[in-house]
Image: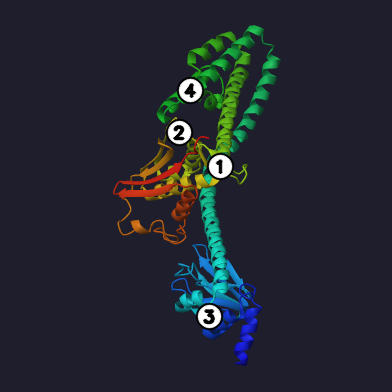
Amino acid sequence: MTDRNDLVERLAGHRTIGSAPRAELEWLAANGKLHRYQPGDRVSSHDREVEALYIILSGHVAIHVDRGAGLRRIVEWRDGDVAGVLPYSRLRKPPGDALVEATTEVLALARERLPELTRECHAVTTSLVHVMTDRARQFTANDLHDEKMASLGTLAAGLAHELNNPASAATRCAQTLLEELIAVEASCRALGAAGLSPAEVAEIDRVLGTCMVAATDTTRSPLEQGDREDEILTWLAAHGVTDAAAGSLAKTGVAVDVLDRLARVIPDAALVPAIQWVASGCAGRRLALSIEAATSRIHQLVSAVKRFTYMDRGSMPEYVDIGPGLADTCAVLEGKAHAKGVSVALDVAPDLPRIYAFGGEINQIWEQLIDNALDAVGPNGHVKVTATRDGSRVVVCVADDGPGIPADVMPRIFDPFFTTKAVGQGVGLGLDIARRIVGWHSGSIDVSSKPGCTVFRVSLPTPVPT
């Protein structure tokens, strides 16, 4: 009896249920079972049904999950907390393994006693329902955070791949541009010493201008480029000019007859520096255009990511245009599509109304659906994204021509932690999070699938005019 009285006193000092009437605490002491655990013990396992309500009297217990990147602690309980199955909870299996971190004592009430608990202990039940609500909110926040991290990982990998190409191109062009600038300076000094007349200088400028106009839309096959280089080398040799400028001139669109005119107008002594000046000037301007194109691409990608994540916006809902969000999502996933040779088509109706939503969360839906579609199709596959208006709702469809979703998998695709991807490639939260976000915005999401055509359809309401 003394031990039970001591247990009741300990329950009376419990942070969560200690304020309940003593009779209820006595009921818990009489019907629960006291357990003592040592560090490393397992209280519950992710692959087994939770057996009891656990009232933690002392110690430390934590749930660890492995979602492809090793064990990670997501929830912790210490003395004064409650864990396990709670009254009215639909929890069957925990998201991970509950491991003991320090010597722990818990009062365990078996799952089958919970209905009796709700009848006999109203105050305790009320406290536990509050705990259940908080726990559900915490688990949801953890799941959303995990999926955001997974999405950001996908985003970062794709962005790094996409940024690498223009960044490398800009670096190469900048290095070559420095060499061309040195050549231009040497040519300028030689031309200055030649004492050319204004008409002769104007002719050189005319050739340089022709070079730049032609270079903007000169595209040749490798065979055509080889023939062009041979032609330039022949002309240079015929006029006693070194072939140092051949490569730069061959990349321009300057015709041989333009060079013939230049050779007639310019004195022989000034022809070599004039040709070098034209070649280096054309190359320098072409490199500057390439640097501009590469850095513009980098700016476009960074801008798309900034818009995609709504990183400069507050945490309040606002009026959101679906079209730009879909375009930005396709942009940040463009690298993955190119790597697989998949074409992504986007078709947004011009009269699409805005929705009232959290823009970053809405884009997370599109990222998940389009990313899954890219995973589903094979090389040279096709993904089509459409956005249309259906009465007072906006409907977005993401379709792919992959093999389809097997019939036995279809009922489970929105279940949390369910994934058909290999270990480490998915945590099984993406579609569950997408479904939750759609639900938070009073929308709906469904899927239809057959071999060669899988379509995810998201319907979101538009604001009612006031």
Which of labels 2 and 4 is toward the front? 2
- Please tell me in which quadrant of the rendered image residue 410 appears: bottom left
Q: Give the residue number, with chain letter if any, for mark 1.
A: 305
First along the sequence among labels 3 and 2: 3
Rate crowding at label 1 as few (under 14), some (14 to 19) or many (20 or more) other CA atoms within 10 Å. some
- Residue of label 2: 352
Q: CA distance from mark 1 to mark 4?
A: 31 Å
Label 3: which secondary element: strand
| Above or below: residue 102 compared with residue 171 | below
Q: Tell me which amino acid carries mark 2.
A: Leu
Q: Which mark is residue 108?
A: 3
Circle nearer the N terminus (2, 4): 4
Question: Which dot, 1 or 2, sits closer to the camera?
Answer: 2
The answer to which of 162 and 22 lies nearer the viewer is 22
Q: CA distance from mark 2 to mark 4?
A: 37 Å
Q: Nearer the viewer, mark 3 or mark 4?
A: 3
For the residues marked 1 and 2, what is the alpha-carbon distance in whole angstroms?
22 Å
How far is the residue under mark 3 from the one under mark 4?
78 Å
Q: Circle 4 sits in a helix, a strand or a loop, which is it?
A: loop
> Quick one: 424 or 322, which is closer to the camera?
322
The residue depicted at 47 percent of the width and 79 percent of the height is: 113
Label 4, on which residue? 217
Q: Is residue 72 visible?
A: no
Give the residue displayed 56% in from the left and 25% down from the top: 245
Q: Could you tell me how far apart the alpha carbons at marks 3 and 1 are, in whole angstroms? A: 49 Å
How far from the left and from the top, in percent, is residue 148?
Answer: 54, 53
Mark 1: which amino acid? Val
